[in-house]
Image (cartoon, coloured by chain):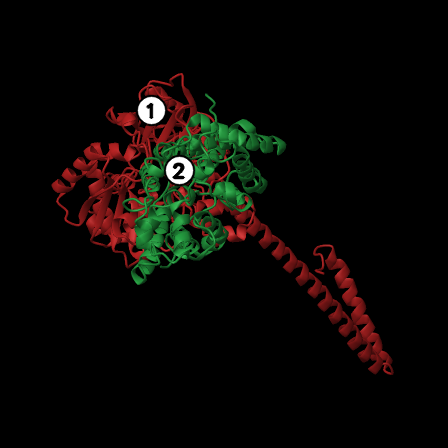
Chain colours: A red, B green
Amino acid sequence: MTLPARKRLSTSLPLGSAGIPEYLILPLSQHVGTAAEAIVAVGDQVQRGQPVAKATGYVGSPVHASSSGTVVEIGPHPVPHPSGLTADCVVIRTDGEDRPFNGYDPLSNYRTLNAPALRARVRECGIVGLGGAAFPTAVKLNVGVGLKSLILNAAECEPYISCDDMLLRHRPEEVILGAQIMLHALEIRHCCVAIEDDKPEACEALMQANASVGDDRIEVVVIPARYPAGGERQLIQVLTGEEVPADGIPADIGFLCHNVGTAASVYRAILKGEPLISRIVTVTGEGVAQPANLDVRLGTPMAHLVEKCGGYTPSATHLVMGGAMMGFPLDRDDLPVIKASNCILVASREEVRPRDTALPCIRCGECARACPASLLPQQLHWLTRAADFEQVEALNLYDCIECGCCDLVCPSHIPLTQYFRYAKTEIWARKNEREQSDHARERFEARQARIERQSQERKQRLAAKTRTLKKAGKDEAARKAMIEEVMQRVRDKKSGSQNESEPE
Amino acid sequence: MRQFQRTMPPHLRPATSVTRVMGEVLLALVPATTAYVWYFGPGILVNMMVAVTVAVAAEAAVLAARGRPVASSLGDLSAIVTAVLLAFALPPLTPWWVTATGAAFAIVFAKQLYGGLGYNPFNPAMVGYVILLISFPAEMTRWLPPGGLDLAAERPDLMATLGYVFTGQLPPPLAWDAIAGATPLDQVKTELGLARTVEEIRAGPLYGDFGARGWEWVNNFVAIGGLWLLYRKVIRWQIPVAMLAAVIVASTVFYLLEPGNYPPPSFHVFSGATMIGAFFIATDPVSAATSERGRLIYGAGIGLLTYVIRTWGGYPDGVAFAVLLMNMAVPAIDRYTVPRAYGHGR
């Protein structure tokens, strides 16, 4: 569907810099997968680009200091997360000197390196997807064979967000060079950079950069600006007409999607030896005086960005991280920018959806027309209300990407996406509960069987002993020896039972 | 630190509302209403007034009794749409108590007792109309011939209309025998029963270029409103196209087989309630099928049943019955027309 883009709001000013804030708050978990583990202590001096936490687990990523200074705290802090909970963070008081760490050599000879070596560098530089999901890039680059094409996503279909647009206007060559590195690491020969037609300046810059690099493996494709074309599965459908299987990933049909910002940070990690310590953030909405895009060091508090953009306007009432369609609300502005923060939207009351009461569904079917996954939101809504989760699953609720299109076209203003999020967690919780009760029942049954078996065995042992005792009945010596042996065993058991309790 | 209010995504404002949808439907009926008044006099305006008053009062009463918010539910304009569509189905001169009974029945029984807006399985306006057609056949079949014809030289004006609607008496110079007439569909049915051919019947003064005089133009103006609704995306093309196509295909087949006994497709399309059925009645989303494929089946079913009832049934027009019959089929249609979701095998 076509949405009001509202991107011009933040693209009139050139790309700025947010500078170095007094404190940097670096959450240990800024990405999909397991949280990183702090490797610095309070009081340590750190340099710009120095790792402060190491990755744990395959799907994980390290965290680097985004400027030089002193570690003043390692502990729980509020972080930007839909739950509003706190998480462990490394807090650095900056010294303003911004001394570099120089721990990673530029790999200008990357063409002579193999894929695992490049992936290792991408991983140790802490690079994750910058489109918003923050999935570790090294894991995604390890897709195996059979890949047809790398797709670099510059669609940026969400209203308000323009960070990829500004990246392409200002540093298009970084994206092209990053694409070359990725092609080398993936050992394939085709890359398609997809960009929506509402960003002519970025598109022009990208095509010029591509022409000057002169790599015929890389192709720029302009697609119509239709939300949610930037969704991985939707983008593949727009570009190729193929659909990613519901239970699979794009690589199953030979495609791999990365955000253009990710490609630029891969370029920096490989050719400049710079870990991921900053990103471009769109600061926009009617709640900021001068909306703009800023190059921001990770860990910078959001209030600092708003200050750089002229501060709040009197109408600022809502704070959202991400775009107006899929971004989640934040309670407070002292939260740090993380790797996934593509946009900080400070909205006025007039810009956001009012919390009015929904009317009943009139079955108009517009939601089904708008759904990019061809689901029936209206039926899913009825079934969720009826708590018929079996049918909800049968109608493929899990293919819902929560893009919010159905909400927007609903004349009854029903919060459909919210219903679907609820249904998903409810189904998940019920499954969990069922598994737990199944597990408990199995344990109980196994215990009953074990007790039964043991008492049977005891009876058999007793019977066998009685028999041998009877056999030895006449022979007094043998009988005595046997009794003595039993007594000894009881004594051993008694002295032993103080240390180890006998199993049932 | 500054605190902010939370709203859940998506944060953008919805683009439309039920009130807008219903309001546009009402607006789209303006051309047809104008044509109606031109050809049949001010009766429809009086009928609309009575129906709207009763429908709104009935809706408010039931909402209050059910403990639901009255003002916001009336604000969705759905009761007014039902009343206006019912008024379109009534003869120009209908006693007020007939109109009131239909409107009250449509709102109370067909809509609110099922749970109100969004929950009614049957089209309320058509339920109200069918109740009246069955209960008061004499009042419901006394039509006026369209204006501009010799046989309607004397027509009731606004005062005469009001007088008849509210007192049941026509002012002295007018008499039912002088001014009343059957609808063209009715007449064709009767005369075919008298073994006259379609050719002969259509030579009569009631008939115009493609349908019947007056009615064909009301139908044209209904279609203009319908096309505007399509353009505004208030309705989608599937139901009207499928319904009209089914009527055309069925009537063409029989017309080609036996032109003397079966009226041509143009007559069916531009007579009776075909157009208003296709664009305004069958497209009522609450009681229609929801998926695109489902709507094609639903619309085609209505078109086909309309033709069957008109041709072989006991009533001259069949749109209302066809709509109600297909309403019953909606759950089954929805069940078997679930679209293939993204990423699930073709």
Q: How packed is label 2: few (under 14 Cα within 10 Å), some, or many (20 or more)?
A: many
Q: Residue furthest top?
A: A314
**One can see residue A357 in this view:** no
Q: Vertical placement of B150 versus B312: above or below?
A: above
- Inspect the image, locate mark 1, and give the three-letter code of the amino acid beneath it: Ile
Using the image, name the chain to which the residue with label 2 belongs.
Answer: A
**Residue A467 marker:** none
Give the residue drawn at x 59%, y 53%: A434
Q: Element at badge 2?
A: helix
Residue A159 falls in image quadrant:
top left
Q: Classify residue B335 as left or right of residue B146.
A: right
Whether residue B51 can be seen here: yes
Q: Is residue B1 left or right of residue A154?
A: right
Q: Earlier in the sequence, mark 2 or mark 1?
A: 1
In the rendering, at what x and y percent does residue A163 appear? 29, 33
Q: Quick one: B217 or B339, which is closer to the camera?
A: B217
Q: How many marks?
A: 2
Q: Is disc 2 in the same subunit as disc 1?
A: yes
In the image, is residue A350 above or below residue A275? above
Camera-nearest residue between A374 and A192 = A374
Q: Position of residue A366 (x, y in %)?
A: 40, 42
Label 2 vs label 1: CA separation? 43 Å
Classify 10 Å Cα crowding around label 1: few (below 14), some (14-19), many (20 and above). Answer: some
Check disc 2 and give the amino acid type. Answer: Val
Residue at image mark 1: A20
- Residue B166, given in percent of the width and then of the height, sits at 53, 29
Callout 1 secondary element: loop
Label 2 sits on residue: A409
Q: Nearer the viewer, residue A189 or A490?
A: A189
State which mark lies toward you, 2 or 1: 2
Query: Going by the image, does A20 lie left or right of B104?
Result: left
Q: Residue at x 84, y 79 (%)?
A: A477
